[in-house]
Image: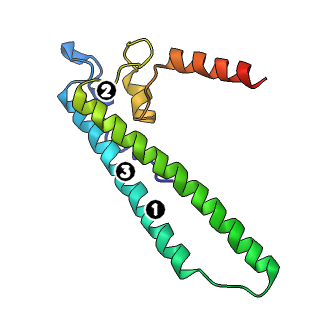
Amino acid sequence: MPQISKKSAPAADQKQKKGGDYMNATQLKHFRKMLEQLKGELGEDIDRTVHTMQDEATVFADPNDRATQESDMALELRNRDRERKLIKKIDETIAKIDAGDYGYCDSCGVEIGLKRLEARPTATLCIDCKTLDEIREKQVAK
């Protein structure tokens, strides 16, 4: 899965300095660029997988070889499905940037925080709400 590059982080540099606004135009532009770059890389991975699977569609006589190939393809398809869902989430996040809602918790409305968004630009919950969400998940799973 593509990694988000850490080379430029103007959003972190803009951290409330000199009365800077949270999610100002520079920060929004930075996060949009990050998201679009990640989406592009994911799209390339998906295309590469499709071509690879078409090229490697070999019929093996040995059942073990066939089972290994099917297992590998199933794993690859699961990974691509995960990436497809991430692309959908990236599109939703870009729509939030356009609507002016990016960077604020969907649950309580507080600022998510620049460091959290740098680590996970598609985050929709602040760290407190996400922690509570995970605690609830663990309790339901028991």
Amino acid under disc 1: Ile
Display coloring: rainbow
Work out how far the residue at label 2 is from the one at label 3, CA to CA, in angstroms: 17 Å
Whether pointer 2 and pointer 3 mark residues with C-beta atoms closer than 8 Å, the reply is no
Q: For the residue carrying disc 3, how many other residues have a C-alpha within 10 Å: few (<14), some (14-19), or many (20+)?
A: many
The local secondary structure at tag 1 comes to: helix
Work out how far the residue at label 2 is from the one at label 1, CA to CA, in angstroms: 27 Å
The image quadrant of residue 41 is bottom left
Question: Which residue carries the number 3 mark?
Answer: 39
Question: Which residue carries the number 2 mark?
Answer: 102
Amino acid under disc 2: Tyr
Front residue of this view, candidates 128 and 21: 128
Front residue of this view, candidates 7 and 74: 74
The local secondary structure at tag 2 comes to: loop
Front residue of this view, candidates 38 and 138: 138
Horizontal and vertical percent position of residue 111: 37, 16
Amino acid under disc 3: Lys
Horizontal and vertical percent position of residue 135: 66, 18
Q: Which badge, 2 or 3, is on the more N-terminal residue?
A: 3
Whether pointer 2 and pointer 1 mark residues with C-beta atoms closer than 8 Å, the reply is no
The local secondary structure at tag 3 comes to: helix
Q: For the residue carrying disc 1, how many other residues have a C-alpha within 10 Å: few (<14), some (14-19), or many (20+)?
A: some
- Residue at 47% over, 74% down: 51
Question: Which residue carries the number 1 mark?
Answer: 46
Q: In this view, does 14 lie to the left or right of 118?
A: left
